[in-house]
Amino acid sequence: MNPTDTADTTMDGSIYSNYYNYESSVPGPCTKTGVKAFGELFLPPLYSLVFLFGLLGNSVVVLVLFKYKRLRSMTDVYLLNLAISDLLFVLSLPFWGYYAADQWVFGLGVCKMISWIYLVGFYSGIFFIVLMSIDRYLAIVHGVFSMRVRTFTYGVITSLATWAVAVFASLPGLLFSTCYTERNHTSCKTRYSANSTTWKVLSSLEINILGLVIPLGIMLFCYSMIIRTLQHCKSKKKNKAVKMIFAVVVLFLGFWTPYNIVLFLYTLVELEVLQDCSLEKYLDFALQATETLAFIHCCLNPIIYFFLGEKFRKYIVQLFKTCRGPFAPCQYCALLRIYSADTSSSSYTQSTMDHDLHDGL
């Protein structure tokens, strides 16, 4: 899955593009010069912004978890792994940004490795969001049972299993990614053998099923049961918990659903159900837009922790209070302290919220 090509004729920034070694089946060539030019202009700066914000935000999460939280619970373990997943994801973006602006100049080994790292970060990030939803469900709906299973040890075991599944799901990116030069342009794509429509369709379905359908189904079940349980809870923290649930679900739907819909339409193109060059061009532009929207999601988790988590926000303030140097001037620390004082009654972190709600049920 290389986010810089949707077809052999273009280079347009699709997150799933290198699963497609697509040759247009419509009569005559389907030229996509405009799509390529659009990608060269807009994708590199967008990738750079996502990389910078994702790297900064998730690095802060990792520092806070190690410095203050000490990884005492299952939730802390999942938060750490989610941040690591997002970091893996964003670390591949500088390579794809340069590729979108020019061509692939890093060689075959880096092509395979970056494609694989990108996919591992993509899958593991979504899987850990699902695990955190299950963790929250157990804490609130099955409070007594959760006291036995929501431990640091079980958190480590399930995290290792999750990474194993993500690595296995990402193997096509490692095995089939390759470099080749065509028309004086070097590409890094996933290329299958001739007439390999089955592989292409299965790869597309893998993204849609593992990346949206199954995670969304689990999240909707967990959060619907949580809300149902909270209806019988008179704690003032109920509204805070519902807001957190609403934020997580809406953000996941809003940032990933459009992209998966476009990928599904690309599957129909691959199956030759849809055969129209103009439609392909529109899909290429749509894939660029929805892919960038999906990328932004990896930057949002730290923002959710900060604005909806009182203790997490306090930890960040403490971290910045010790900051020194030109990249973290003292006025930023002061702004954080003011914000924290003005919003001291806001929601809790996910682990704190779950614990408090469990005590209140």
Image: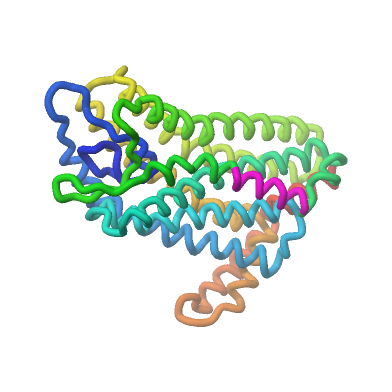
Residue span colored magenta: 153-164
Across and down, in percent, residue 164 comes to: 60, 45
Which secondary structure dominates the residues rendered in magenta?
helix
Please indicate, yes or no, whether residue 142 appears anywhere in the rendered image: yes
Residue drawn 60% across and 29% down? 217
Q: Is residue 152 left or right of residue 148?
A: left
Tell me, yes or no, whether the highlighted magenta stretch contains residue 53.
Answer: no
Count the labels in the image: 0
Please indicate, yes or no, whether residue 265 appears anywhere in the rendered image: no
Q: Is residue 156 left or right of residue 144?
A: left
Across and down, in percent, residue 141 comes to: 79, 36
Q: Which residue is more in the foreground, 321 or 59?
A: 59
Farthest residue in the right direction? 144
Farthest residue in the left direction? 28
Farthest residue in the top direction? 273
Across and down, in percent, residue 241 comes to: 70, 43
Residue drawn 23% across and 50% down? 186
Q: Is residue 273 left or right of residue 150?
A: left
Question: Could you say which quadrant of the image residue 101 lies in?
Answer: bottom left
